[in-house]
Image (tube, grey):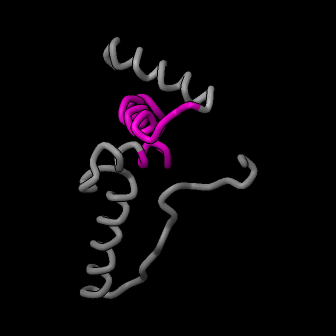
Amino acid sequence: MKPKDLDDARAIAKKLEDGTITRRDLIAFLIYIRESIPNDMVKDLAHFVAHPQRNKGFAFDYTEAFAARVVSVFIAGGDLKVSPIFEFDPADH
């Protein structure tokens, strides 16, 4: 992350902690941190904010691959297996 962006992200994180964050701050924060966070739902949300046309992100990739599998099963037959986009372990929450 560029130093200026890191400074902005830190200032926004402080607003988040203080409870004074705005919608615009949150959108900017997600865009700033998206390349530095793990591959999970928050990162996918950050990609969605940064790319509202939805040409990037885990949910987009999953949906695109799932549609291709549906077409393949429809044409060639076979089993259609559906797996979750994001793994969820109830013990973690």
Task: Give the residue at x 52% y 55%.
Answer: 86
Task: Give the residue at x 49% y 44%.
Answer: 42
Task: Give the residue at x 47% y 60%.
Answer: 85
Which of the pair 26/36 is nearer the observer? Answer: 26
Q: In the displayed structure, does residue 82 sit left or right of residue 88?
A: left
| Residue 31, above or below 72 | above
| Residue 29, above or below 56 | above
Q: Which residues are magenta?
A: 20-45
Within the magenta stretch, is there residue 22? yes
| Residue 61, above or below 12 | below
Q: Quadrant of the N terminus?
A: top left
Q: Position of residue 48 (x, y in %)?
A: 35, 50
- Counting the numbered discs, the total is 0
- The residue at the far right in this view is 91
Q: Main secondary structure of the magenta part?
A: helix
Q: In the displayed structure, does residue 73 sit left or right of residue 25?
A: left
Within the magenta stretch, is there residue 31? yes
Task: Give the residue at x 45% y 41%.
Answer: 23
- The residue at the far top in this view is 3
Q: Position of residue 12 (x, y in %)?
A: 48, 25
Q: Position of residue 33 (x, y in %)?
A: 42, 30
Which of the pair 44/3 is nearer the observer? Answer: 3
Q: In the displayed structure, does residue 74 sit left or right of residue 58?
A: left
